[in-house]
Image: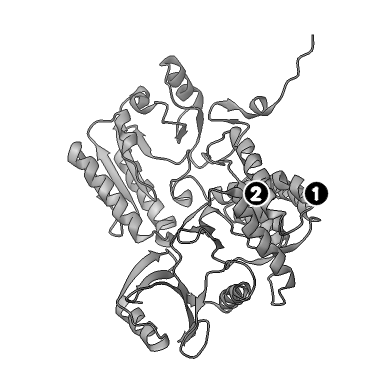
Amino acid sequence: MEIENIRKLIQDNYDINIQNTEIFRESSNGNCTYAVYNTDKKYFFKAVNNLAVQEMETALSSIDIQLYLMQSDVPAIPIIFTKDELPCIRINKQDKKYMYVMYEFIDGSGDPRSMIKAGEALGKIHHVMKNYTGRLVERSKYYFIDRYVGLMRKHQYPRAEFFGEYGNELWDKIKNLPRGYCHCDLYDGNMLKAKENDKIYLVDFDTSCMGFPMYDMTLFCNRTNYFKYDYKGYERTRIRLEKFLTGYQRYNTISDEEISAVWHMLAVYHFQLCSQGIERDGYLTDQNACSSPRIIFWFGEKTKDAQDVFWHSLNEQFLHDYVMPTIITVDKLVIACRYAAANECRIISTSDYKLVRVRPQNISASIFASFANCGFFYEYDINAIDEILPVCTRECQTLSYIGFDKNELKRVVLNNSAFGIDRIVPVGKTMDFGLIWDGVDLIRELSRIIVTR
């Protein structure tokens, strides 16, 4: 909806004298949030568009939870009621449903520095929600495990059945944990510390459910990095959880069994990430993974024909369904033009910029300083395999291939003492996790050896 229409909608339904309205954040699914100003106050206006029946029920449930929390002794971001004393505006247009909600604007930052206070905030909410009588969606094995296995099977991942069995093992470890209210999306950005009064607020209740309260703590305290293994992340997670629990247990009880299950919950979260990652190497992780493709080298006698087939197939099979935020389009164009200003190259793109290809005249390691995500590729024609060596620096983790002998590629890397390239795998397999990652033997790194003499 255009800004002018949003402004009129607010003026018609709220007792607010609007001075200005700005887009605050626009998501790829069409939903949008706005900053609304009057003479001395700022508001947050949320527009949720084109809702299915079940999605509308979820959105209304989220509002009901927030209203309940507003009446309780917990910091809840106040909802501004309409002139008709309603907590939201609901509009039906040609079988499409829309919902709009106005909040007071809380100027704050995500991930409060005090883990104890963050624990107190969640402990209060978990405790208060024990008396909530509204309907909460029951989240069970399908939500935590099976839908991700289904994603693998959808994409015909060859190890889908293995992951199905692994998912069953993980579920067996958590299925009997105590149930209760679960925010279910408690990442750093969904817990705000207000600058004005240092209060801590939870936001975005759209995934609220009857689930595992421990899952909230696991997500918030997690400091592991699935895409870049660092064993110290587990220790950082343990330290955060220890401080978090100090505050949490002042307001809500939690069993030793639940606390010990944090590592099982973390394994479930990593399982979900792995399953989503099966949607493959480039676009389906928005090129954010450490193993996502960045540079494509073409080698052989008919590279032009191969390029035409490759890019046409990518466009036909995938790009028409790919949703890319507008801001990413701008980022891709800025980075491509900035590179072109300093280097001789040719830029090729689709009309919607879902695919941007940059073809430099020369290739060097400096190219790693000019990357974008979501379908931004450098490509370069080579006459010999060793012409890839200039980019085989420490910044280059994975080499994927089509039509090459993997042992020949390995020989080129080893014989030239390349600093980079920890993995050589077929195209489409760059996200397959193994016990050797980033050149590190994970079992050995995670093992403790007690020496006796």
Asked if 258 appears above or below 45 in the picture, the reply is above
Looking at the figure, which quarter contains the C terminus? top right
Residue located at (73% from left, 59% from top): 252
Query: x, y percentage for residue 447?
Result: 70, 26
x 44%, y 21%: residue: 413
User: Sequence-wise, which precedes: disc 1 or disc 2?
Assistant: 2
Camera-nearest residue between 315 and 56: 56
Q: Quadrant of the N terminus?
A: bottom left
Coloration mode? one colour
Query: With 294 as the anchor, is 264 left or right in this view?
Result: right
- In terms of depth relative to the viewer, which is nearer, 101 or 425? 101
Q: Position of residue 430 (x, y in %)?
A: 51, 39
Instruction: Give the label on residue 244, or none.
Output: 2
Where is 101 relative to 366, above or below? below
| For residue 394, above or below residue 323 | above
Q: To which quarter of the image does residue 144 belong?
A: bottom right
Question: For the view shown, which residue lies furthest in the front direction?
Answer: 197
Image location of residue 223, percent across then percent down: 58, 42
Query: Which one is closest to the eye, mark 1 or mark 2?
Result: 2
Q: How far apart are the alpha carbons under marks 1 and 2?
A: 17 Å
Q: Amino acid at mark 2?
A: Phe
Give the residue displayed 74% in from the left and 64% down from the top.
180
